[in-house]
Amino acid sequence: MLKDLKLITLHGTQDIKEAMQRIDKTGIRIVLIVDKNKKLMGVATDGDIRRAILAGKNLGTPVSEVMNTRPITTPEGTPATALLEMMLEKGIYEVPIVDAAGRLVDITLLSELKTIPLSSPDITPKEVALINRVIATPYLSIGPEIEEFERSVASYIGTKYAVAVNSGTSALHLCIKSLDIKDGDEVITTPFSFIASANCILFERARPVFVDIDRNDLCIDVNKIEEKITDKTRAILPVHIFGHPCRMDRIMEFADRYHLAVIEDACEAIGTEYKGKKAGAFGDCGAFGFYPNKQITTAEGGMITTNNEKIARLCRSMRNQGRDEKDSWLSYTRLGYNYRMNELSASLGVAQMDRIDEILKKRQKVAGFYNERLAGVDGIKIPYIAPDVKMSWFVYIIRLDERRFSQEQRDRVIRELKERRIDCRDYFPPIHLQPFYVEMFGYRKSSFPVTEEVSGLTVALPFHNNLTEREVEYVCDTLKDIISGV
């Protein structure tokens, strides 16, 4: 609430110029007009003032001539939940609070009532019940829930094997390791991704060779892959970015022609399909992540999918310190890691996989709310979906039009959204411009111009299964208002 109502309170005889100065000074888009007894006579928003000036009014016009004399108000003592519901329903950002005599008492700002989070996991009583059941058993690590989760994911993706681990990063690392990629080898991938997709190559002292992205789907540009293949290239690591699949038919053609392995980074793409086949089922192996902002979550966790028995066996061994199935308790066949998933996480995954069709439909519905309200808005590009693609929505990313906006203006949009309690982020900073990649490989700006342009204009808006249509409408209206000002 405001500390001093005087900052936005005027008398009817004061003019439009004074009202504009108050709005500019406070950043609140409304002034309240009262009589000498503090009774609320009306309100004037920045929109009311703009329309009045366009209609021929001048800065000296009394504000009483442009005010709304029947504003929406609320009585003092109204619960915050009721205020929030009303403001979202009516699409208003400020509501004056009045007493029984109609005198101004305070003002409620929507931005003070609610922060809309960037993401939120969808956990139901079913997940809680399964976790509680596991807690009551002797198995808290490597037990029946992990095996059930692995079977569920393998069946869903359409692969023979699935290997559960403690993160998507661990999954990617074990994929690299299981293919014997090592010092001096090269792996072709994208600079527009979460940094783990490139770091996992460095873990084995191989070199990530970046290929710029397609300007539309933001995945690796398949038309630029072949020129990067050398006698040191061992694999291609495409990233199904934001849940949109790469053009896997072309990538598999290159792999077959040059005898290369393919590791799919599907950490953001469970449920994604390309030409009727699910992401994670094309290459030698695929990696999924189940962080809380993903389509399904195990809190922390990941999964490797493959049709190759040797890869599955090696990954199972390496996730558990290098112990093979035939090894005794403290015997280890190879170098391994503590990449195990625990039973509690796996039980959460089992419940989420039971609900995956429901979950993906929810996310599609929320994306539809955004598309409906942002399609055709000047200055905004909504996500592109290529033909032959079934999208699994990880996040909702808009891009500002490069002909109108700079990265600095994008950053201002993000700041102003956060000031209005709408959480948002830039997605993703280019990997090649991260400090240690610049130091290690000498990358500079303009090394991958499409990645850099796109990265400088993206905004990730709030997106999760249970985001309401009213919340989406508030986000979109606020975004459009901010963009018009920028």
Image: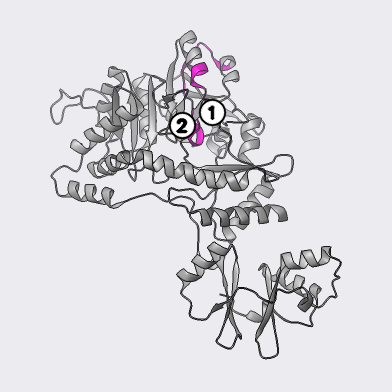
Residue 197: mark: 2
Q: Is residue 395 left or right of residue 325?
A: right
Residue 105, how many percent across, how many down?
58, 83
Identify the residue at horizontal 46%, vertical 10% (top origin): 256
Tell me how far mark 2 sits from mark 1, CA to CA: 8 Å
Q: Is residue 376 left or right of residue 246?
A: right
Q: Verify whether residue 236 appears in magenta.
A: yes
Query: Crowding near pointer 2: few (<14 within 10 Å), some, many (20+)?
Result: many
Give the magenta part as a residue range.
228-251
Q: Nearer the viewer, residue 111 or 102?
A: 102
Residue 190: mark: 1
Let me know if residue 482 appears in the view. Answer: yes
Identify the residue at horizontal 59%, vertical 61% (top origin): 419
Q: Nearer the viewer, residue 52 or 137?
A: 52
Residue 142, how many percent across, how many down?
20, 36
Residue 299, how many percent across, how many down?
34, 46
Identify the residue at horizontal 56%, vertical 46% (top origin): 370
